[in-house]
Image (spheres, helix red, strand yellow):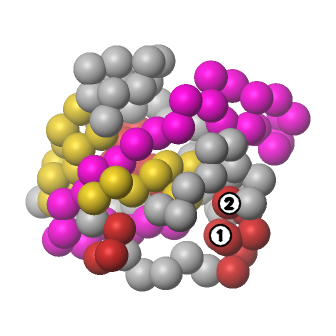
Amino acid sequence: MTRITVLPHAELCPHGEVIEAEAGQSLCDALLAEGIEIDHACEQSCACSTCHVIIREGYESLPPATDIEDDLLDRAWGLNPRSRLACQIFINTTPLTVEIPRYTINQVRGEKHG
């Protein structure tokens, strides 16, 4: 199991969380399994940017984003050089520290949440 530290988010986890995830599991699935209801409008098919996260620690251990993921990230609110889509991050053995941005732009519904 790999330790995932989720920094505090006003709505999703006000005090932050530390969770354990299995290698090979997507970060989005790991968050949802622990009750952290990250938005995922496209059902994790890499077709929106609602599961945008910022990897504060462990970023270097992840494979690079695909061109499709990079294109979608361009639409995300609060884009950062360490931004990724949680549906495209597959847990390995390196612990991660994750920040969920305050807002998300739901491309499917055409709304901004947060």
Q: Which residue lies furthest to the right in this view?
A: 110
Mark 2 or 1: the one toward you: 2
State the CA–CA distance, disc 2 to disc 1.
6 Å
Q: Is residue 21 magenta?
A: no
Towards the viewer: 2 or 97: 97
Q: How far across and how far down the image is residue 67, in percent? A: 69, 80
Q: Is residue 111 magenta?
A: yes
Point 12% across, 60% down: residue: 1
Could you tell me the amino acid type at mark 2? Answer: Leu
Mark sitting on residue 73: 2
Relative height, residue 7 to residue 11 (above, below): below
Q: Residues within 10 Å of mark 1 (few under 14, many from 20)?
A: some
- Give the structural element (helix, strand or loop) at label 2: helix
> Which residue position is annotated with label 1?
69
Point out the stretch of residues depicted in magenta. Answer: 88-114
Q: How far across and how far down the image is residue 98, in percent? A: 35, 48
Q: Is residue 3 visible?
A: yes
Q: Is residue 47 visible?
A: no
Towards the viewer: 29 or 74: 74
The picture quadrant where one finds residue 23 is: bottom left
